[in-house]
Amino acid sequence: MSSRTAAWLAWSLCALSLALTALNFLLIALILSLDAPIFFYWLEPTVVAVGYSVIGAIIASRLPNHPIGWICCAIGFIAAVEHFSGEYAVYALVARPD
């Protein structure tokens, strides 16, 4: 894989993780506006998703053959997907059960 392709892929994965994290905050705001009872656990998954995604994108874009950058990108993306799916499940099942 060329370094340009690796940089594009790493930063695209980072942008997707950050977009999912932003959607998490939108879902949290919607849940709080409906006064639904929630388990409000958002700080750690947000820090993991943002931190690992950005650090992984920096490492993977500069050193495309080094596995640590790609592992960090994967950890950040998985954390963002996990957080988004949890908040969406709360919104769909508790806040809007119909």
Image (spheres, grey):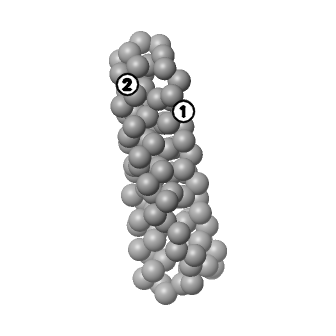
Kindly identify which residue carries mark 2.
61
Query: Alpha-carbon neighbours of circle 2 within 10 Å: few (<14), some, or many (≥20)?
Result: many
Mark carried by residue 47: none
The quarter of the displayed image where residue 30 is located: bottom left
Residues marked 2 and 1 touching at CB (< 8 Å): no
Callout 2: SS? helix
Would residue 34 appear left or right of 95 to someone viewing this image?
left
Kindly identify which residue carries mark 1.
71
Vertical comparison of 53 with 23: above or below:
above
Query: Alpha-carbon neighbours of circle 1 within 10 Å: few (<14), some, or many (≥20)?
Result: some
Gap between marks 2 and 1, in whole Å? 13 Å
Q: Nearer the viewer, residue 1 or 96?
A: 1
Vertical comparison of 64 with 92: above or below:
above
Could you tell me the amino acid type at mark 2? Answer: Ser
Q: Nearer the viewer, residue 96 or 7?
A: 7
Callout 1: SS? helix
Q: Residue at x 59, y 72 (%)?
A: 90
Tag 1 or tag 2, which sits nearer the N-term? 2
Is residue 26 at least partly visible in the picture?
Answer: yes
Estimate the x, y position of residue 20 in percent, counting from the top left: 45, 53
The quarter of the displayed image where residue 6 is located: top left
Q: Residue at x 44, y 19 (%)?
A: 64
Q: Residue at x 51, y 28 (%)?
A: 68
Q: Residue furthest top?
A: 2
Q: Residue at x 57, y 84 (%)?
A: 37
Could you tell me the amino acid type at mark 1? Answer: Ile
Estimate the x, y position of residue 18 in percent, counting from the top left: 40, 49
Vertical comparison of 87 with 59: above or below:
below
